[in-house]
Amino acid sequence: MIQISRGHYLASLLLGAAFGFAASLFESTQIIPLLPYFIFNNFQSNVYTLMVAVFLAPFTEEIAKILPVFFLKTQENIELDVVGWMKLGITSALGFSLLENFSYFVLFSTFYQIYAAIWYLLLRFMLSTPLHLMATTVASYGIGNWDNYGEGKYLAFLAIAMVIHSLFNFGTMILEF
Amino acid sequence: MAFKKLFMFLSMFLAWLSLGWLSSTFIFKLAGVDVTTQSFRSFRFVTIILGLCLLFLSALFYVVSHFIKEKERISKFIRCKVCGRKIPFDMVMCPYCFSDVRERKNELKEEVSGESA
């Protein structure tokens, strides 16, 4: 068995970004099953945004941020205790969040001036990044306990992380961020 | 140990998040983006209250992480000496490499009896 090294943290960071990209692709394809609904309801984009932000994104993203740690554990045969799970999970979430922030920065810079986009990037770094790290810490604590002690009840922490993420997204929608 | 660390991490991220909420409307203003809510002042009031609540929660988590006590937990799994895979502690043979794990069990038994003596 191998102990966690710096290389594993770097791999987790990059894998977090890669899995984040895959998650965003998955989320964007989920409009297809909803197309009939939108066609018959005059395309209410608010409903789609609500469904993605409050239901789909938390579910997909929380799983996408945990998968890199699973991947590393199985492929590299790393010895992971619960704290190790949390540390690698946080690194993965950081990679995920950095890629997400960068993609929003690119999107925002096409609509607004570059200095506004930079401020917007800072805002995302102050709001979105800690949320991702926090949710993944909770999720990885549960998964780590389940992996180390075989107690399935700890999987509830993954659901708690999804609820935290969902509430945050809902709150930002209510405040019209 | 892990639960303590969980609270420490959460405290840290909550403090970061609270700073984000406290500074959000100021960053909006610096960016020159039109705030779409009807009253910018009430919007700022909400974000500041939210930021302060999160800051309080962060401080609470930090204090709790210092006072929390955890029992040492025993894993229900052992590692196979040959292949290193995780197997249930009551296995006689490793289901992956078919190596004998009784030796390992005897070692554990000796450790336990040595401690009790």
Image (spheres, grey):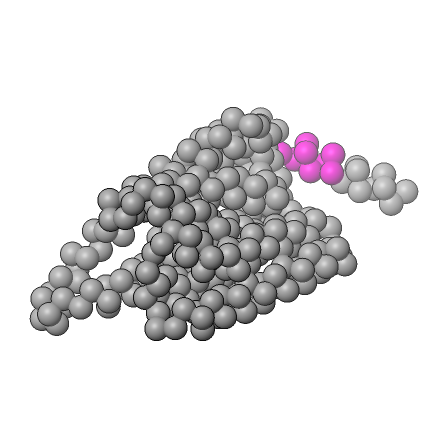
Residue B92 visible, this angle = no
Could you say where residue A155 lies in the image, as x and y percent from the top left?
Answer: 50, 57
Residue nearest the observer in this picture, B26 or A134? B26
**Image-quadrant location for residue A167:** bottom left
Is A129 or A106 nearer to us in this picture?
A: A106
Q: Nearer the viewer, residue A68 or B32?
A: B32
Image position, residue A144 (x, y; %): 55, 47
Image height of B11 relative to A87, above or below:
below
Q: Quadrant of residue B80?
A: top right
Would residue A169 be visible to someone looking at this image? Answer: yes
- Tell me, yes or no, whether the highlighted magenta stretch contains residue B8: no
Which residue is located at x 61 percent, y 44 percent? A83
**Which range is magenta?**
B100-108
**Looking at the picture, how far across and down is residue B55, in whole percent?**
61, 61
- B63 with respect to A123 (left or right): right
Q: Main SS of the magenta segment?
A: helix
Give A58 or A71, whichever is nearer the viewer. A58
| Residue at the spot 65% in from the left edge and 51% down from the top edge | B8
Quarter of the image with the N terminus of chain A is top right
Q: Looking at the picture, how far across and down is residue A62, in whole percent?
A: 42, 52
| Residue at the spot 47% in from the left edge and 42% down from the top edge | A94
| Up-down relation of residue B56 to residue A95 (above or below) | below
* Horizontal relation, residue A79 to residue B116: left or right: left
Q: Is B92 on the left-hand or right-hand side of B67?
A: left
